[in-house]
Amino acid sequence: MKKYLIISISICFFLTGCKKDYPDDIPPWVKNMIREFKRSGKSHQATACGDCPVLILEYKETSINQKLYSIQLCDPTYDYLYNDKGDPICNIELWNCNGPNGCNCGPYNSKNIVFVRKIWQAHCQ
């Protein structure tokens, strides 16, 4: 009995140890980007880690029900909003804001963009 318990616990640890640290229901290009950040973070800590680690967020454009993704890096010059196909829409820092109508980012308006979830953040030691 003790033998089966040890085997069961070992299997549980093995299965949870292999779990990805990002959701399965994201587009392949986002998964590839995460893999690239992880790879670069291992050899160049400043790339994915440092003072402000890489952060990937998911948003939803409510008027057309489209998922959008934000890739945030230390340098705001590279903080872009992407559509679900991986096409860059606009630089988040350069949104065109004009009064009470919200900010425009490409064809999207900030009033219609809502936060959904955090997809991934670089885990730095």
Image: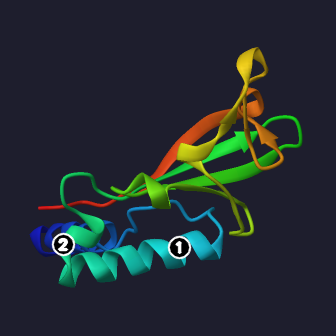
The alpha-carbon separation of the residues under discs 2 and 1 comes to 20 Å
Between disc 2 and disc 1, the foreground one is: 2
- The residue at which mark 1 appears reads as 31
Q: Residue at x 31, y 66 (%)?
A: 16
Residue 103's image quarter? top right
Q: Position of residue 73 (x, y in %)?
A: 39, 58
Residue type for callout 2: Gln
Q: Secondary structure at mark 1?
A: helix
**Which labelled disc corresponds to residue 106?**
none
> What crowding class fits label 1: few (fewer than 14 Cα within 10 Å), some (14-19), or many (20 or more)?
some
Q: Please tell me which residue is depicted at 63% across the width and 76% down the height of the picture.
A: 28
Q: Earlier in the sequence, mark 2 or mark 1?
A: 1
Q: How many labels, in total?
A: 2
Question: Amino acid under label 1?
Answer: Lys
The percent position of residue 83, horizontal first and vertical second, equals 73, 59
Residue at the (63%, 62%) spot, across then down: 25
Residue 58 location, x and y as percent? 59, 48
Q: Check disc 2 and report its element: helix, strand or loop.
A: helix
Q: Circle 2 is placed at which residue position?
A: 45
Q: Nearer the viewer, residue 12 or 29?
A: 29
Residue 90 sits in which quadrant?
bottom right
Q: Residues within 10 Å of mark 2 (few under 14, many from 20)?
A: some
